[in-house]
Amino acid sequence: MTARVLVTGATGYIGSRLVAELLSAGHDVVVTSRTPERLTAFGWYRDVTAVSLDANDPDSVATLFARCGHVDAVYYLVHGIGETDFRTTDNEGARRFALAAAEAGVGRIIYLGGFVPADDVLSEHLAGRAEVAQALAVAGGAELVWLGAALIIGAGSTSFEILRYVAERFPVLPQPSWLSNPIDPISIRDVLHYLMAAVDSELVPAGAYDISGPQTTSYRDLLAAYARLSGIRQWTVPAPGVPTVVASKVSAVALPVPGALTADLTASLDHPMTAAGEGLRNLVPAPAGGLLTVNTAITRSLHTPERVPVTDLADPHHLADTDPSWAGGDMSRIRQLTPSIARPALALLALLPGPATATLRTGIDILAELIPRGHRR
Protein backbone atom coordinates (compact mmCIF):
# COMPACT_ATOMS: atom_id res chain seq x y z
CA MET A 1 0.00 0.00 0.00
CA THR A 2 1.36 3.41 -0.98
CA ALA A 3 0.09 6.71 0.33
CA ARG A 4 0.69 10.44 0.28
CA VAL A 5 2.26 11.19 3.65
CA LEU A 6 3.48 14.32 5.38
CA VAL A 7 6.54 14.19 7.64
CA THR A 8 6.98 16.96 10.20
CA GLY A 9 10.39 17.17 11.81
CA ALA A 10 11.93 15.85 8.61
CA THR A 11 15.29 17.48 9.31
CA GLY A 12 15.71 15.55 12.55
CA TYR A 13 17.61 12.32 13.14
CA ILE A 14 14.61 10.00 12.82
CA GLY A 15 12.64 12.15 10.39
CA SER A 16 15.43 12.37 7.83
CA ARG A 17 15.90 8.60 7.81
CA LEU A 18 12.16 7.98 7.73
CA VAL A 19 11.76 10.14 4.61
CA ALA A 20 14.40 8.05 2.85
CA GLU A 21 12.59 4.83 3.84
CA LEU A 22 9.20 6.14 2.73
CA LEU A 23 10.54 7.14 -0.67
CA SER A 24 12.19 3.74 -1.11
CA ALA A 25 8.80 2.13 -0.45
CA GLY A 26 7.15 4.23 -3.17
CA HIS A 27 5.21 6.69 -1.00
CA ASP A 28 4.54 10.27 -2.12
CA VAL A 29 6.22 12.35 0.57
CA VAL A 30 5.64 15.92 1.75
CA VAL A 31 8.13 17.36 4.26
CA THR A 32 7.98 20.46 6.43
CA SER A 33 10.46 22.76 8.09
CA ARG A 34 10.39 26.18 9.71
CA THR A 35 13.21 27.10 7.33
CA PRO A 36 12.64 25.27 4.01
CA GLU A 37 16.14 26.26 2.87
CA ARG A 38 17.53 23.69 5.35
CA LEU A 39 15.81 20.92 3.43
CA THR A 40 18.06 21.41 0.41
CA ALA A 41 20.93 19.77 2.33
CA PHE A 42 19.19 16.39 2.40
CA GLY A 43 19.72 13.73 -0.25
CA TRP A 44 15.97 13.27 -0.74
CA TYR A 45 15.18 16.97 -1.34
CA ARG A 46 14.49 16.70 -5.08
CA ASP A 47 12.14 13.74 -4.52
CA VAL A 48 9.77 15.33 -2.01
CA THR A 49 7.33 18.22 -1.82
CA ALA A 50 8.67 20.81 0.63
CA VAL A 51 6.36 23.11 2.61
CA SER A 52 7.17 25.62 5.34
CA LEU A 53 5.65 25.02 8.78
CA ASP A 54 6.14 26.67 12.13
CA ALA A 55 4.05 24.71 14.64
CA ASN A 56 4.17 27.70 16.99
CA ASP A 57 2.63 30.04 14.39
CA PRO A 58 -1.18 29.67 14.20
CA ASP A 59 -1.32 31.09 10.67
CA SER A 60 1.38 28.71 9.44
CA VAL A 61 -0.46 25.70 10.85
CA ALA A 62 -3.91 26.85 9.69
CA THR A 63 -2.79 27.17 6.07
CA LEU A 64 -0.49 24.13 5.94
CA PHE A 65 -2.87 21.65 4.33
CA ALA A 66 -4.17 24.20 1.85
CA ARG A 67 -0.58 24.71 0.73
CA CYS A 68 0.51 21.06 0.61
CA GLY A 69 -2.75 19.50 -0.60
CA HIS A 70 -4.41 16.32 0.61
CA VAL A 71 -2.36 13.79 2.57
CA ASP A 72 -3.47 10.39 3.79
CA ALA A 73 -1.33 10.33 6.92
CA VAL A 74 0.98 12.53 8.94
CA TYR A 75 4.10 11.59 10.89
CA TYR A 76 4.27 14.03 13.80
CA LEU A 77 7.92 14.20 14.89
CA VAL A 78 8.01 17.78 16.16
CA HIS A 79 9.45 18.40 19.63
CA GLY A 80 11.14 21.26 21.40
CA ILE A 81 13.05 19.31 24.07
CA GLY A 82 16.02 21.33 25.25
CA GLU A 83 14.29 24.64 24.50
CA THR A 84 12.86 27.02 27.09
CA ASP A 85 9.36 26.02 28.28
CA PHE A 86 9.26 23.28 25.62
CA ARG A 87 6.48 21.39 27.41
CA THR A 88 3.89 24.16 27.04
CA THR A 89 5.04 25.03 23.53
CA ASP A 90 4.88 21.42 22.37
CA ASN A 91 1.38 20.91 23.78
CA GLU A 92 -0.02 24.02 22.18
CA GLY A 93 1.61 23.25 18.84
CA ALA A 94 0.31 19.67 18.81
CA ARG A 95 -3.26 20.73 19.60
CA ARG A 96 -3.16 23.41 16.92
CA PHE A 97 -1.81 20.92 14.38
CA ALA A 98 -4.41 18.25 15.23
CA LEU A 99 -7.28 20.70 14.74
CA ALA A 100 -5.92 21.76 11.35
CA ALA A 101 -5.48 18.12 10.33
CA ALA A 102 -9.06 17.34 11.37
CA GLU A 103 -10.41 20.20 9.28
CA ALA A 104 -8.35 19.00 6.29
CA GLY A 105 -9.68 15.45 6.58
CA VAL A 106 -6.36 13.77 7.40
CA GLY A 107 -7.07 10.13 8.21
CA ARG A 108 -4.18 9.22 10.51
CA ILE A 109 -1.52 10.86 12.64
CA ILE A 110 1.50 8.75 13.63
CA TYR A 111 3.32 10.14 16.61
CA LEU A 112 6.63 8.92 18.02
CA GLY A 113 6.95 9.70 21.73
CA GLY A 114 8.39 8.00 24.77
CA PHE A 115 7.36 5.47 27.37
CA VAL A 116 5.22 6.78 30.21
CA PRO A 117 6.30 5.10 33.48
CA ALA A 118 3.61 4.54 36.11
CA ASP A 119 5.20 7.02 38.51
CA ASP A 120 3.46 9.88 40.28
CA VAL A 121 6.12 12.41 39.29
CA LEU A 122 7.69 12.34 35.82
CA SER A 123 10.49 14.33 34.25
CA GLU A 124 9.53 17.28 32.05
CA HIS A 125 10.55 15.26 29.00
CA LEU A 126 8.43 12.20 29.80
CA ALA A 127 5.39 14.15 30.96
CA GLY A 128 5.59 16.40 27.92
CA ARG A 129 5.70 13.51 25.46
CA ALA A 130 2.52 12.02 26.95
CA GLU A 131 0.76 15.39 26.87
CA VAL A 132 1.56 15.83 23.18
CA ALA A 133 -0.12 12.50 22.45
CA GLN A 134 -3.22 13.67 24.30
CA ALA A 135 -3.19 16.97 22.41
CA LEU A 136 -3.05 15.18 19.05
CA ALA A 137 -6.18 13.14 19.84
CA VAL A 138 -9.00 15.63 19.13
CA ALA A 139 -12.67 14.64 18.91
CA GLY A 140 -13.70 13.97 15.33
CA GLY A 141 -10.11 14.29 14.14
CA ALA A 142 -7.56 11.95 12.63
CA GLU A 143 -7.06 8.59 14.29
CA LEU A 144 -3.87 8.48 16.31
CA VAL A 145 -1.13 5.85 16.38
CA TRP A 146 1.17 6.66 19.27
CA LEU A 147 4.44 4.76 19.27
CA GLY A 148 6.50 5.02 22.45
CA ALA A 149 10.23 4.30 22.52
CA ALA A 150 13.00 4.55 25.10
CA LEU A 151 16.68 4.92 24.18
CA ILE A 152 17.22 4.60 20.42
CA ILE A 153 20.55 3.04 19.44
CA GLY A 154 22.12 4.55 16.35
CA ALA A 155 24.94 6.97 15.58
CA GLY A 156 23.42 10.44 15.56
CA SER A 157 20.59 9.60 17.97
CA THR A 158 20.85 12.10 20.83
CA SER A 159 20.30 9.47 23.52
CA PHE A 160 22.92 7.19 21.97
CA GLU A 161 25.42 10.03 21.57
CA ILE A 162 25.05 10.90 25.26
CA LEU A 163 25.73 7.24 26.09
CA ARG A 164 28.75 7.28 23.77
CA TYR A 165 30.32 10.40 25.29
CA VAL A 166 29.69 9.30 28.88
CA ALA A 167 31.50 6.04 28.11
CA GLU A 168 34.34 7.79 26.27
CA ARG A 169 34.94 10.75 28.58
CA PHE A 170 34.58 9.22 32.03
CA PRO A 171 37.24 6.54 32.55
CA VAL A 172 36.13 6.45 36.20
CA LEU A 173 32.35 6.47 36.29
CA PRO A 174 30.28 6.97 39.46
CA GLN A 175 27.45 4.45 39.73
CA PRO A 176 24.27 6.03 41.16
CA SER A 177 21.49 3.59 42.02
CA TRP A 178 19.25 4.89 39.22
CA LEU A 179 21.71 3.57 36.62
CA SER A 180 20.27 0.14 37.45
CA ASN A 181 16.72 1.08 36.49
CA PRO A 182 15.48 -1.30 33.77
CA ILE A 183 15.31 0.01 30.20
CA ASP A 184 14.12 -1.43 26.89
CA PRO A 185 16.28 0.14 24.14
CA ILE A 186 15.58 -0.27 20.44
CA SER A 187 17.75 0.08 17.34
CA ILE A 188 17.06 2.83 14.80
CA ARG A 189 16.51 0.17 12.12
CA ASP A 190 13.69 -1.34 14.16
CA VAL A 191 12.16 2.07 14.96
CA LEU A 192 11.97 2.79 11.24
CA HIS A 193 10.47 -0.66 10.62
CA TYR A 194 7.61 0.04 13.02
CA LEU A 195 7.10 3.61 11.81
CA MET A 196 6.79 2.35 8.25
CA ALA A 197 4.25 -0.28 9.30
CA ALA A 198 2.16 2.28 11.19
CA VAL A 199 1.03 4.03 8.01
CA ASP A 200 -1.03 0.94 7.09
CA SER A 201 -4.34 1.13 8.96
CA GLU A 202 -5.20 -2.46 8.06
CA LEU A 203 -2.00 -3.69 9.70
CA VAL A 204 -1.83 -1.32 12.68
CA PRO A 205 -5.12 -0.17 14.26
CA ALA A 206 -5.25 3.22 15.96
CA GLY A 207 -3.93 3.09 19.51
CA ALA A 208 -0.87 3.43 21.74
CA TYR A 209 2.00 0.96 21.36
CA ASP A 210 5.37 0.82 23.10
CA ILE A 211 8.10 -0.41 20.76
CA SER A 212 11.32 -2.00 21.97
CA GLY A 213 14.13 -4.36 21.09
CA PRO A 214 14.39 -7.97 22.26
CA GLN A 215 16.25 -7.26 25.52
CA THR A 216 15.57 -5.54 28.82
CA THR A 217 18.78 -4.09 30.24
CA SER A 218 19.87 -1.06 32.30
CA TYR A 219 21.77 2.13 31.55
CA ARG A 220 24.67 0.74 33.59
CA ASP A 221 24.80 -2.36 31.38
CA LEU A 222 24.43 -0.29 28.22
CA LEU A 223 27.49 1.76 29.23
CA ALA A 224 29.39 -1.45 29.95
CA ALA A 225 28.38 -2.93 26.60
CA TYR A 226 29.46 0.23 24.75
CA ALA A 227 32.84 0.25 26.56
CA ARG A 228 33.43 -3.45 25.84
CA LEU A 229 32.48 -3.26 22.16
CA SER A 230 34.49 -0.09 21.52
CA GLY A 231 37.57 -1.25 23.42
CA ILE A 232 37.33 1.39 26.15
CA ARG A 233 38.66 0.61 29.63
CA GLN A 234 36.34 2.02 32.27
CA TRP A 235 36.30 1.73 36.05
CA THR A 236 33.23 2.24 38.21
CA VAL A 237 32.78 3.48 41.77
CA PRO A 238 29.60 3.25 43.87
CA ALA A 239 27.75 6.57 44.27
CA PRO A 240 24.25 5.61 45.41
CA GLY A 241 23.20 9.08 46.60
CA VAL A 242 23.98 11.09 43.45
CA PRO A 243 20.69 12.43 42.00
CA THR A 244 20.00 12.77 38.29
CA VAL A 245 19.90 16.56 38.60
CA VAL A 246 23.59 16.57 39.56
CA ALA A 247 24.49 14.07 36.84
CA SER A 248 22.62 16.13 34.24
CA LYS A 249 24.51 19.30 35.18
CA VAL A 250 27.88 17.55 35.00
CA SER A 251 26.98 15.92 31.69
CA ALA A 252 25.79 19.24 30.24
CA VAL A 253 29.24 20.70 30.88
CA ALA A 254 31.37 17.65 30.01
CA LEU A 255 29.63 16.47 26.84
CA PRO A 256 29.46 18.19 23.42
CA VAL A 257 25.73 17.43 23.11
CA PRO A 258 23.67 20.63 23.68
CA GLY A 259 23.49 21.12 27.44
CA ALA A 260 19.74 21.66 27.85
CA LEU A 261 19.03 18.60 25.75
CA THR A 262 21.43 16.49 27.82
CA ALA A 263 19.88 17.70 31.07
CA ASP A 264 16.30 16.93 30.01
CA LEU A 265 17.13 13.43 28.80
CA THR A 266 19.31 12.58 31.80
CA ALA A 267 16.47 13.49 34.17
CA SER A 268 14.40 10.71 32.57
CA LEU A 269 16.82 8.07 33.89
CA ASP A 270 15.17 8.44 37.30
CA HIS A 271 12.40 6.17 36.04
CA PRO A 272 12.21 2.56 34.82
CA MET A 273 11.85 2.72 31.04
CA THR A 274 10.29 -0.58 30.05
CA ALA A 275 7.66 -1.28 27.42
CA ALA A 276 4.05 -1.88 28.39
CA GLY A 277 2.80 -5.06 26.73
CA GLU A 278 3.91 -6.50 23.42
CA GLY A 279 3.63 -3.28 21.44
CA LEU A 280 3.44 -4.09 17.73
CA ARG A 281 5.12 -7.49 17.89
CA ASN A 282 1.82 -9.37 17.57
CA LEU A 283 0.69 -7.17 14.67
CA VAL A 284 3.79 -6.41 12.63
CA PRO A 285 6.19 -9.16 11.49
CA ALA A 286 9.75 -8.61 12.70
CA PRO A 287 12.35 -7.36 10.20
CA ALA A 288 14.40 -9.95 8.34
CA GLY A 289 16.67 -11.64 10.85
CA GLY A 290 14.62 -10.45 13.81
CA LEU A 291 14.83 -7.41 16.07
CA LEU A 292 18.41 -6.34 16.73
CA THR A 293 20.07 -7.14 20.05
CA VAL A 294 21.85 -4.44 22.04
CA ASN A 295 25.29 -5.75 21.07
CA THR A 296 24.44 -5.89 17.37
CA ALA A 297 22.89 -2.43 17.34
CA ILE A 298 25.84 -0.85 19.16
CA THR A 299 28.34 -2.62 16.92
CA ARG A 300 26.60 -1.32 13.81
CA SER A 301 26.49 2.18 15.32
CA LEU A 302 30.24 2.12 16.04
CA HIS A 303 31.08 1.60 12.36
CA THR A 304 32.21 5.02 11.11
CA PRO A 305 32.43 5.34 7.34
CA GLU A 306 32.62 8.80 5.80
CA ARG A 307 29.39 10.71 6.19
CA VAL A 308 27.16 10.53 3.14
CA PRO A 309 23.66 11.82 2.27
CA VAL A 310 20.96 10.10 4.30
CA THR A 311 19.58 8.49 1.13
CA ASP A 312 22.96 6.82 0.52
CA LEU A 313 23.44 5.28 3.97
CA ALA A 314 24.34 1.59 3.79
CA ASP A 315 22.90 1.24 7.29
CA PRO A 316 20.64 3.70 9.19
CA HIS A 317 22.91 3.20 12.23
CA HIS A 318 25.66 5.11 10.41
CA LEU A 319 26.09 8.89 10.46
CA ALA A 320 24.65 10.97 7.63
CA ASP A 321 26.15 14.24 6.45
CA THR A 322 23.11 16.06 7.84
CA ASP A 323 23.41 14.64 11.38
CA PRO A 324 24.68 17.01 14.09
CA SER A 325 28.36 17.92 13.90
CA TRP A 326 28.80 16.87 17.54
CA ALA A 327 27.67 13.31 16.82
CA GLY A 328 30.05 10.40 16.32
CA GLY A 329 32.35 10.53 19.32
CA ASP A 330 35.67 12.25 19.91
CA MET A 331 37.66 10.32 17.32
CA SER A 332 35.09 10.95 14.62
CA ARG A 333 34.92 14.66 15.44
CA ILE A 334 38.69 15.04 15.44
CA ARG A 335 38.83 13.24 12.08
CA GLN A 336 36.31 15.70 10.62
CA LEU A 337 38.38 18.69 11.72
CA THR A 338 41.78 17.32 10.71
CA PRO A 339 43.23 17.91 7.21
CA SER A 340 43.23 14.70 5.17
CA ILE A 341 47.03 14.67 4.92
CA ALA A 342 47.32 14.37 8.71
CA ARG A 343 44.61 11.76 9.24
CA PRO A 344 46.91 8.68 9.20
CA ALA A 345 48.48 10.02 12.42
CA LEU A 346 45.13 9.90 14.16
CA ALA A 347 45.62 6.19 14.82
CA LEU A 348 47.94 7.26 17.63
CA LEU A 349 45.02 8.88 19.43
CA ALA A 350 43.55 5.47 20.15
CA LEU A 351 46.37 5.06 22.69
CA LEU A 352 45.19 8.08 24.69
CA PRO A 353 42.58 7.93 27.47
CA GLY A 354 39.16 9.43 26.78
CA PRO A 355 39.75 12.72 28.66
CA ALA A 356 42.90 13.37 26.61
CA THR A 357 41.11 12.96 23.29
CA ALA A 358 38.26 15.11 24.64
CA THR A 359 40.72 17.89 25.51
CA LEU A 360 42.38 17.61 22.11
CA ARG A 361 39.00 17.70 20.40
CA THR A 362 38.05 20.87 22.31
CA GLY A 363 41.26 22.52 21.17
CA ILE A 364 40.65 21.51 17.56
CA ASP A 365 37.09 22.83 17.80
CA ILE A 366 38.39 26.21 18.97
CA LEU A 367 40.93 26.33 16.15
CA ALA A 368 38.29 25.33 13.62
CA GLU A 369 36.14 28.30 14.60
CA LEU A 370 39.10 30.59 13.85
CA ILE A 371 39.57 29.20 10.34
CA PRO A 372 37.42 30.79 7.59
CA ARG A 373 34.90 28.22 6.37
CA GLY A 374 36.12 28.45 2.79
CA HIS A 375 39.55 27.19 3.88
CA ARG A 376 38.36 24.08 5.72
CA ARG A 377 38.86 20.67 4.12
Image (cartoon, rainbow, N blue to C red):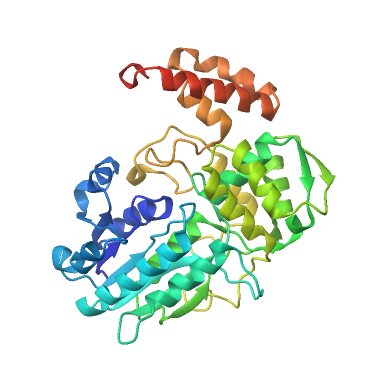
- Quadrant position of the N terminus in the picture: bottom left
Taking the image as shown, residue 48 lies to the left or right of residue 273, namely left
The relative height of residue 90 versus residue 314 in the rendered view (above or below) is: below
Taking the image as shown, residue 108 lies to the left or right of residue 215, namely left
Instruction: Determine the residue located farthest toward the bottom in the rendered image.
Output: 140
Residue 10 image offset from top left, x and y in percent: 33, 54
- Quadrant position of the C terminus in the picture: top left
Instruction: Determine the residue located farthest toward the top in the rendered image.
Output: 341
| Residue 194 seen in render | no
Residue 266 image offset from top left, x and y in percent: 62, 53
Name the residue nearer the viewer: 62 or 147: 62
Residue found at x 34% / y 50%: 11
Residue 367 image offset from top left, x and y in percent: 47, 18
The relative height of residue 371 versus residue 266 in the rendered view (above or below) is: above
The relative height of residue 75 versus residue 42 in the rendered view (above or below) is: below
| Residue 34 seen in render | yes
Residue found at x 61% / y 38%: 253
The image quarter in which residue 329 lies: top right
Residue 140 image offset from top left, x and y in percent: 30, 87
Instruction: Determine the residue located farthest toward the right in the rendered image.
Output: 238
Residue found at x 62% / y 64%: 214
Taking the image as shown, residue 16 lies to the left or right of residue 286, namely left
The relative height of residue 373 versus residue 313 in the rendered view (above or below) is: above
Number of numbered discs present? 0
Name the residue nearer the viewer: 186 or 128: 128
Taking the image as shown, residue 372 lies to the left or right of residue 29, namely right
